[in-house]
């Protein structure tokens, strides 16, 4: 066999990381004396939930994964969360936050999608619709529109932004988006921008809208508090580059969110989780990626500063992976997985799971962790109780057709 | 009359080609459709000047040899270090060992990057040199449809396009599919080289087994399309069919390492049932038979027709156009030259105004063609990376998206790239001449005014390249 270089799409995908945010302030929450922040991180490629948070107390766990199973007394001992679950040792920051009641892990969760296509799965995760197809808006964007139409945001303030050249679906929609990426080129002058904008306004409204958002964002970034990344500093190759990219992208998002007049809601994507070969949950590629994610969470906490206590970060993925290891020491596309919630606003220190068990008959289609929690209930709980989106809007415009999926209560506060 | 003829010629170059060069609108304005078809009819229309480039297998061996040599030097250096040092503190010897390893690594740099850049240069040159560039656009389309990523298999990423894509762009879809699936770059990219039948000889001996990745993506992305009725069982059965499709390891075979091979030891024995048809185990022929049937499946015709129409004409392509291409694909058993001709000869394919946003690669190429400069690969590749479309590094096996929402938010980055490029060429390019020659009759009064009133040549060129007429096709 040829030796496959360190797995695959990861570095290419680095360019797909993106951040979006809206600068409008949830007004109702502010009337309550709060100023909540919310950041959504999409892990593209399908995170192996069992490799991130292992059910070490399940009697069938070791039988399922053999010597690939994370255990409390392995060479890299997993970090205990409660009497049943343990966290991958690559995530010490998440473990610290969990013990400080600032993290919640939701296990055996999934969107309503039950097939195994990444692209459809991500569409459903990000669109908030029950079926794939022609979706061109995301649930986060529609949640912001719901806040706006209910008069629940302060109408002053600008728009949102995206880090990286490509905007993720979760934030596409009528609420305008600005895109931002680390500057490696000399930007065009203000005068050139203004002339181009004038041309677009006379000829092409869509190009005009796209350029306007960029101009707004550059203006916001110039105010100083948001640190400008050093254009000369190119990160090192391989996993070190991934770590540095995750931390820089997430840290930059946090700096924007922390600003008094900055955005309050954002989203970004991290890629590389499609671990078909040599998954390496304990010490290989998955451990490295989880470590990079852990570093990103730490960067967010640090850069949020005092606003951390009003912050919720939701880390979600399109589906899980097969419960068993496949023929090439990896895992194939599956169903149930974890959602990781961190932030000072949470009532944390809990694993929320209606555990389905791992016996062959308990697995979904005999192969995947069976989903017992609809991810939409968790997201609806956060949007309702943290940002104060109306429950009726959550059931209709934000997650259409989800009226019978009750928001999870008590996640924040 | 004259202006509308020029508008159709400009559309032909922007929509189907790599963008106008100085004088190319005039060259084809008497018969733009005929000019497009003539380019396809030229002998060696989809060849690239790649005679000096290594084959994919050779490129693979060059990189593997370098890796092996580097490793040997590192081990030898570490051994020498250990002997010389004698008893020392652990931290000092650790630091010395790292230094020795670093020196060994520097002594044998990775040749993969240079191979990648040489391939990129050949591809860029072909796009810049083409009269129209229709054939090259087809190569880009199919290369994206059947993408691999240089992040996983850098040595082969360029040769793959020359070997598996180019020869079939104007040939049969079934032949391209077979060339792609049996190409080592694809077998590595989608993990099939590591897949083995659970009941194969190697699978039993090594207690390893199936990897579904390639089988699934062939069904979902390359042929039928997602949600066209195949099941998880079809994916598994097809994955079993494809076990044994792998490549010769580089270390074992200095002459043929990196070439495709069918390794019966890895192949799952027995018949397999895929899409309600049973395929007897005939070794590599079992997989070829499934691929032939997939290429001829009605869903494949629809899938390919839709993608082609979306790429060349509009994000939401006119249904009559999709239907005609689907019919042609089915009637000709997937003759891609005939399908391409049907595209050019369809009235819907010439609808105005031009609304399709050029992808970053198309836009950058048309900018360089318009200015009439050359492009060096490192800079060109860096530009595409900045714009979110790094060459041969798509974010997933789905390839780069072909719709406006994916790309329009990158407008700020485009402005930076346009500004940067304009700065470099401003002292030798005349914006007024370029605006006339590449936009011709499609030029709006507003753009003409913006360009002519610009404060500098650089600004004029940046505005020209960023104008809606130049970005939409």
Image: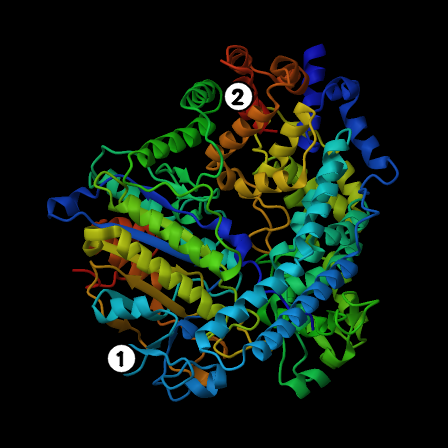
Label 1 sits on a secondary structure element that is loop
Q: Looking at the image, do the residues carrying marks 2 and 1 touch, with CB atoms under 8 Å apart?
A: no
Residue B54 against residue B459 in the figure, above or below = below
Residue B183 against residue B48 in the figure, above or below = below
Which image quarter is the N terminus of chain A in?
bottom right
Give me the residue at 46% from left, 27% from top: A188
Q: Name the residue that disc number 2 marks.
A: B463
Q: Nearer the viewer, residue B225 or A90?
A: A90
The image position of residue B354, as x and y in percent, is: 60, 27
The image position of residue A127, as x and y in percent, is: 41, 51
Describe the colour scheme in one phrase. rainbow
The image position of residue B86, as x and y in percent, is: 54, 81
Give me the residue at 47% from left, 64% from top: A46
Label 2 sits on a secondary structure element that is helix
Q: Residues within 10 Å of mark 2 (few under 14, many from 20)?
A: many
The image position of residue B25, as x and y in percent, is: 73, 20
**Taking the image as drawn, is residue A89 in sight?**
yes
Judging from the image, mark 2 belongs to the subunit labelled B
Q: Name the residue that disc number 1 marks.
A: A82
Give me the residue at 49% from left, 86% from top: A66
């Amino acid at each position: 066999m040829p030796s496959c270089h360190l797995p695959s799409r990861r570095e290419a995908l680095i360019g797909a990381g993106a951040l979006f945010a809206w600068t409008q302030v949830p007004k109702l929450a502010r009337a309550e004396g709060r100023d909540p922040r919310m950041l959504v991180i999409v892990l593209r490629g399908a995170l192996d939930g069992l490799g991130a948070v292992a059910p070490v107390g399940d009697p069938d766990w070791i039988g399922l994964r053999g010597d690939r199973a994370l255990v409390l007394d392995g060479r890299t001992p997993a970090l205990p969360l409660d009497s049943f679950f343990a966290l991958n040792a690559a995530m010490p920051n998440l473990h610290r936050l969990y013990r400080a009641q600032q993290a919640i892990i939701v296990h055996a969760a999934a969107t309503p999608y039950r097939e195994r296509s990444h692209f459809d799965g991500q569409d459903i995760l990000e669109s908030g619709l029950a079926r794939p197809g022609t979706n061109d808006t995301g649930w986060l964007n529609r949640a912001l529109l719901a806040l706006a139409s209910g008069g629940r945001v302060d109408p002053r303030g600008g728009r949102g932004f995206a880090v990286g050249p490509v905007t993720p679906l979760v934030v596409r929609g009528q609420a305008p988006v600005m895109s931002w990426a680390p500057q490696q080129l000399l930007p065009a002058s203000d005068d050139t921008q203004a002339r181009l904008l004038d041309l677009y306004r006379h000829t092409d409204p869509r190009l005009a809208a796209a350029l306007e958002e960029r101009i707004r964002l550059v203006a916001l970034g110039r105010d100083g508090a948001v640190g400008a990344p050093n254009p000369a500093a190119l990160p090192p190759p391989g996993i070190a580059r991934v770590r540095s990219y995750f931390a820089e992208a997430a840290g930059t998002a946090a700096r924007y969110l922390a600003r008094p007049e900055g955005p309050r809601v954002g989203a970004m994507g991290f890629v590389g989780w499609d671990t078909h070969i040599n998954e390496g949950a304990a010490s290989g590629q998955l451990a490295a990626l989880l470590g990079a994610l852990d570093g990103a969470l730490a960067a967010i906490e640090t850069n949020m500063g005092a606003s951390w206590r009003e912050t919720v970060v939701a880390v979600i993925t399109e589906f899980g992976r097969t419960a068993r290891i496949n023929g090439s020491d990896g895992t194939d596309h599956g169903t149930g997985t974890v959602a990781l919630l961190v932030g000072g606003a949470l009532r944390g220190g809990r694993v929320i799971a209606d555990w389905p068990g791992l016996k062959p008959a308990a697995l979904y289609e005999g192969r995947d962790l069976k989903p017992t929690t609809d991810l939409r209930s968790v997201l609806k709980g956060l949007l309702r109780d943290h940002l104060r989106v109306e429950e009726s809007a959550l059931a209709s415009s934000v997650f259409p057709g989800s009226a019978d999926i009750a928001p999870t209560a008590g996640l924040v506060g | 009359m004259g202006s509308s003829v020029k508008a159709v010629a400009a559309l032909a170059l922007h929509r189907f080609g790599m963008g106008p060069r100085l004088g190319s609108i005039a060259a084809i304005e008497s018969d733009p459709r005929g000019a497009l078809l003539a380019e396809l009819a030229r002998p060696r229309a989809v060849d690239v000047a790649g005679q000096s480039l290594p084959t994919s297998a050779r490129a693979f061996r060059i990189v593997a040899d370098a890796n092996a040599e580097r490793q040997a030097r590192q081990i030898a250096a570490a051994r020498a270090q250990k002997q010389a040092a004698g008893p020392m503190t652990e931290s000092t010897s650790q630091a010395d060992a790292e230094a020795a390893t670093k020196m060994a690594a520097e002594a044998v740099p990775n040749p993969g990057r240079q191979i990648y850049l040489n391939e990129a240069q050949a591809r860029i040159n072909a796009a810049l040199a083409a009269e129209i560039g229709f054939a090259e656009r087809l190569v880009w389309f199919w290369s994206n449809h059947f993408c691999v990523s240089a992040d996983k298999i850098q040595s082969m990423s360029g040769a793959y396009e020359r070997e598996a894509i180019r020869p079939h762009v104007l040939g049969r879809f079934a032949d391209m599919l077979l060339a792609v699936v049996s190409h080592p770059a694809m077998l590595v990219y989608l993990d099939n080289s590591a897949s083995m039948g659970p009941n194969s000889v190697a699978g039993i001996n090594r207690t390893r087994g199936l990897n579904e990745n390639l089988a699934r993506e062939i069904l979902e992305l390359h042929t039928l399309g997602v949600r066209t009725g195949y099941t998880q069982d079809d994916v598994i059965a097809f994955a079993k069919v494809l076990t044994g499709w792998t490549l010769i390891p580089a270390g074992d075979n200095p002459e043929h390492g990196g070439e495709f091979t069918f390794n019966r030891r890895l192949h799952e024995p027995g018949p397999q049932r895929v899409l309600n048809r049973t395929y007897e185990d005939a070794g590599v022929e079992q997989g070829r038979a499934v691929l032939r049937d997939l290429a001829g499946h009605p869903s494949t015709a629809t899938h390919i027709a839709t993608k082609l129409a979306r790429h060349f004409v509009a994000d939401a392509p006119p249904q009559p156009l999709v239907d005609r291409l689907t019919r042609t694909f089915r009637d000709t058993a997937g003759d891609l030259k005939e399908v391409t001709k049907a595209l050019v000869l369809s009235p819907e394919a010439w609808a105005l105004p031009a609304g399709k946003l050029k992808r970053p690669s198309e836009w950058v190429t048309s900018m360089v063609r318009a200015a009439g400069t050359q492009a060096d690969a490192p800079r060109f590749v860096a530009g595409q990376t900045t714009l979110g479309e790094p060459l041969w590094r798509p974010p997933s096996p789905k390839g780069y998206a072909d719709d406006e929402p994916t790309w329009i938010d990158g407008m700020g980055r485009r402005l930076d790239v346009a500004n940067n490029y304009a700065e470099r060429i401003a002292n030798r390019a005349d914006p007024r001449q370029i605006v006339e020659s590449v936009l011709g009759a499609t030029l709006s009064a507003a753009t003409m005014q913006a360009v002519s009133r610009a404060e500098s040549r650089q600004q004029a060129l940046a505005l020209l390249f960023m104008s809606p007429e130049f970005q939409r096709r």
